[in-house]
Amino acid sequence: MNILIISHFYEKDGVMGSVRWTSFAHRLAKKHNVFVATHDDGVASLAVEPSNGITVLKIDNECNYVKRGKNKVAPQKTQEKLVLESVEAKKQPSSLKNILRTSLYMESMRFSAKKNASHIMQYLTQNSIHIDCVISTSRPFIDCFIGYYIAKRMHSPWILDQRDLAYNDGDSDFTMKAYCRWFKRMEPKVSAFTLVSYGMAKMFAEHCRFEGAKKEKIKVLHNGYDTEHRAVSLATNQHAALTVSYAGDMYLGRRDADMLFAAIKQVADTSSEISANDFSFSYAGKEGAVVRLQAEKYGIQAIVNDYGFVPHAQAIRLQQESDLLLLLTWNTGIDQGILPGKFYEYMMAEKPIICITCGSLPNGEAEHMINNMHLGIAVNEIEYKKGIEQLALYLKQQMQNKKQKQKIIYTPDKAKVLEFNYDNLALKLERLIEEIV
């Protein structure tokens, strides 16, 4: 089969959004002819480059969603203030300015998408290539538009994938409805919608009000881990301290390590054999001040080692040199099924995971997966006191085991973990493609 993948992020080392479709493309290319259309700065129309047996079609990057300013880093003062606030999203008002900005942005995406789709179809037509399946992934939403115009013109089955939902939990009602209107308009041409978690699939169906046959088009295709990116050997922590690591953003308060620091403080205060200095917390990212502030609340900021923003390879190394890996996520009324990409990296690292879910809803999807696969311990803010007690007991057990046996307790269900290897996920994707073609 000839498969066209449209993905803004592709083969970009260190970019988490690149892993999903780079991994899928490499595996599909072992049996099929794969074409990947990806955005690149400085490309005026279309550039063709072969890569690992895949034909890469580079298209212009003039409508990059980052230009909307949504990913600007807030001033440090604001970050520290937001650590202490609720993680519930504060939606933007549907002001006239917001309505105009959203409308203009959608139209600019459509214009750019039509141009890029035209360049891609021209190349395919000139080379007598018929595409058997089109796959486009969001974000940015421009790739959904490109997939829509190509599937419409070429009458090809189309998978509309959402690595992230097109809209944010803080977007105005108008912005969210604008995206949902387009999803409804695209739906007749869509063979399947794929989302990365059950919670996200549920929210997407509710937001777009898909029922019956439309809802049946929604499938879950998880992210995974790629053993091609695994280091030759898995390092271990040779230091006496029990080391916990976390690399990434704190999302201005939606991710909060407070419960971990509270548990460490409780262990130190209630044990004659363990002090706070027996723990170490390694952080890599741009929000070290936020992490230090959370630890300072319990007087244990000295255990925080802030490495700042580091390349992805170094972040992986930090994981390997740690005893425990921290996973921070959230679960709210408008944001569910949040499974960070590092969750799957953690599976590959083969280290116990401490999962803390913030937000107003218990029983998050990450919690369920951690418990179901026996990957570590999962707690949530809703059961704050109970969670700290559980964490403190878990940390104390791990510390004692390390001191006595020089070994960390980790007994995962390896068969279940293996399901998230991209080799197996690619087989699931291939079966879906065969069903719709």
Image (cartoon, helix red, strand yellow):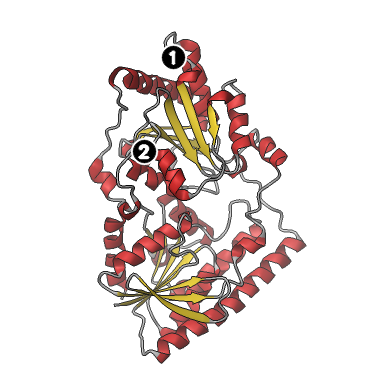
Quarter where residue 350 is shown:
top left
Q: Looking at the image, can residue 328 be seen?
A: no
- Left or right for 100, reference 403: right
Task: State the image quarter where residue 6 is shown.
Answer: bottom left
Query: In front: mark 1 or mark 2?
Result: 1
Residue lying farthest to the top in this orientation: 272
Q: Pinpoint residue 64: horizontal percent, then vertical percent.
A: 59, 67
The residue carrying mark 2 is: 370
Alpha carbon distance from label 1 to label 2: 27 Å
Horizontal and vertical percent for residue 301? 58, 25
Q: Which structural element holds mark 2? A: helix
- At x 51% / y 84%, what residue is drawn? 118
Instruction: Identify the image quadrant of the C terminus.
Output: bottom left
35 or 312: nearer the eye?
Answer: 312
Q: Residue at x 62, y 24 (%)?
A: 297
295 shown above or below 51? above
> What's under tag 1, amino acid-wise?
Ile
Q: Earlier in the sequence, mark 1 or mark 2?
A: 1
Whether residue 417 is visible:
yes
Q: Quadrant of the N terminus?
A: bottom left
Residue at (39, 19) in percent of width and height: 396
Residue that badge 1 annotates: 274
Question: Along the line of sight, which residue is nearer the eye, 296 or 208?
Answer: 296
User: Crowding at label 1, few (<14), some or many (≥20) Cα neighbours within 10 Å?
Assistant: some
User: What's the amino acid at mark 2?
Assistant: Ile
